[in-house]
Image: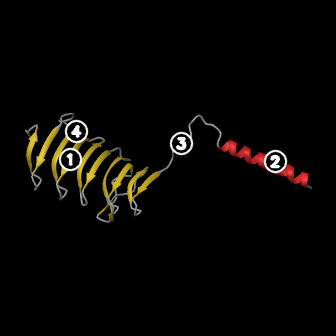
Amino acid sequence: MKKSIHIKSLVLGALLVAVVFLITAPTGEKPGDILRVRQLIIVDEKGAERIVIGAPVPDPQVMGKRLHRRSPATGIQINDASGNERGGIGMLDDGSFVVGMDDERNERVDLFFLPGNGAGLGVKDEKGRNRISLFTPLTGTQAGTPKLEMFDESGKAIFAVPTPK
């Protein structure tokens, strides 16, 4: 009987070793080289989500309210201690690519590419109004020609290069 238990133990042990070997068998990659996740969330000491790296990232929270993006986004979202989005880098499913910096209420600086439209940089005031715009359109009569504009608080262009014709 003891011999039978000993053989069963050896067989079970051998099977366990085989399973562990198969699970950890070399794949040509060093252990720890790749981490595959849909989201990585970094929290602060109070548990607030401060950095979210994801595919997709969640819709932004602004002043405590969840807002919807115009298109799902993959990227990095940076939040303040209250969970409000304050900046990020995102590639949207509509093909746009945006780098943004926000204050607690509004987007303040955006570096962007909009497919079929163009690329640019926008700077807004504390009320979210466009104040400086640098834009290079992809299409139209001005395609490829950069335009720099500055706006007053009413939205009227007070400076433009090239000057409007």
Which percent across, then down, holds residue 93?
38, 47
Left-right relation of 159 to 145:
left
State the separation of the CA atoms marked 4 and 1.
14 Å
The mark that comes first in sequence, 2 or 3, is 2
Looking at the rendered structure, the secondary structure element under dot 1 is strand
Q: Which residue is mark 3?
A: 32
Outermost residue, bottom side: 64
Q: Which residue is mark 1?
A: 122
State the separation of the CA atoms marked 1 and 3.
40 Å
- Labels 4 and 3 touching (C-beta < 8 A): no
The mark that comes first in sequence, 4 or 1, is 1
Neighbours of disc 3 within 10 Å: few (<14), some (14-19), many (20+):
few
The mark that comes first in sequence, 4 or 3, is 3
**154 and 90: which is toward the camera:** 90
In the image, what residue type sits under mark 4? Pro
State the separation of the CA atoms marked 2 and 3.
32 Å
Left-right relation of 86 to 48:
left
Q: Which residue is mark 4?
A: 137
Q: Which residue is mark 2?
A: 11
Q: Residue, x 18% and y 36% (percent of image)?
A: 146
